Amino acid sequence: MDVDTRLLRYFAAVAEEGHLTRAAERLFVSQPALTKQIKQLEAQLGTTLFTRSRRGMALTDAGRVLADRVPALLDGWDRACRETRAAGSRVLRVGFLASAANEATPAIIAAFGRRRPGWRVDMRQAAWSDPTAGLAAADVDVALLRLPFPGQDELRVRELFSEPRWVALPASHPLACRDEIDFRELWDEPYVAAPAETGWWRDHWLGADEREGEPRIGAVTDQPDEWLSAIANGYGIALAPESAARFYARPGIVYRPVRGLSPTRVGIAWHPADDDNPVVADFVACCLDTTRAEYT
């Protein structure tokens, strides 16, 4: 019997969290989709893996047996995939989110090319619905990310640099003529937000820890073009890194500095299993060296 490894990853997350909602947030999927995948795995195995109750998801005897074996199985599969790819082609897969290390990325890739002649960097952009940029699903080897993000504690993360959070406003907005805006003046505005399953990564870009009350959501998007269109059309405003004013300049949108907000941070992340991978180590070193030169 063949079982999709993605189903096993979903099972492992629910087993570890003991709760569907928390597991769904960790995996960046909706709760109904996760429930469907667990039922599919149970159907394939012909047994019940969880006892469902109002308190959460408890493993059955069969579920405990599988839970004991799945982590090692997935680790072994991930390592086999990485080693196979490395042996078959000199390609390092780098996930990234739009706006993460934009200005530094070309210099990082150039430095890596000098350090690893013959190797190619395959840049893979992820939607904002996956703040790990493919790391959570082991689709990439390393990722350039905005910090903080859900699941960060399970990965190796090095901060590269920080920059202020600004606000993106429709050009017709009453505050668009200001040189600087106090965050308190933006609390009651509708916001263009990331999908709810991104958890506290979304909260960071709503300024949840630095406001009073719940933010109003005017639109939900997970791609830069949709995000820009929603702002330009007046569905809401959005917090953004300062560099967005240079990379995502667009008619109908203005970017302004915001007082009362902590900065956003950019980091490089990888799986602990790759701590001894010299290619990953070289790429991380290039990220650190390049951003140190650029931002200090």
Image (cartoon, rainbow, N blue to C red):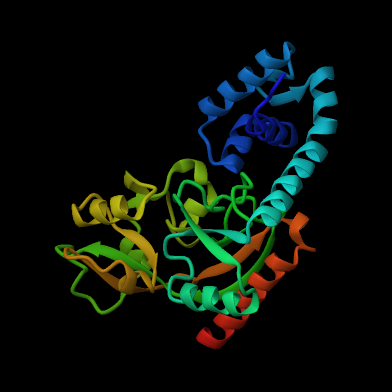
Is residue 63 found left or right of 120 in the rendered image?
right
Image spot of residue 158 (x, y percent): 66, 69
Q: Which residue is at 74% across, 59% downward?
A: 274
Q: Which residue is at 56% across, 21% downward?
A: 36
Against 181, is 142 above or below?
above
Image spot of residue 63 (x, y percent): 79, 22
Q: Who is closer to the viewer here, 17 or 214? A: 17
Total marks shown come to 0
Q: Who is closer to the viewer here, 250 or 212? A: 250
Q: Which residue is at 18% across, 63% downward?
A: 173
Against 26, is 241 above or below?
below
- In the rendered image, the quadrant that contains the C terminus is bottom right
Against 167, is 32 above or below?
above
Q: Which residue is at 74% across, 19% downward?
A: 49
Is residue 291 found left or right of 247 in the rendered image?
right
Which residue in the rendered view is the most extreme toward the top?
46
Q: Who is closer to the viewer here, 87 or 72? A: 87
Q: Is residue 248 visible in the rendered structure shown here?
A: yes
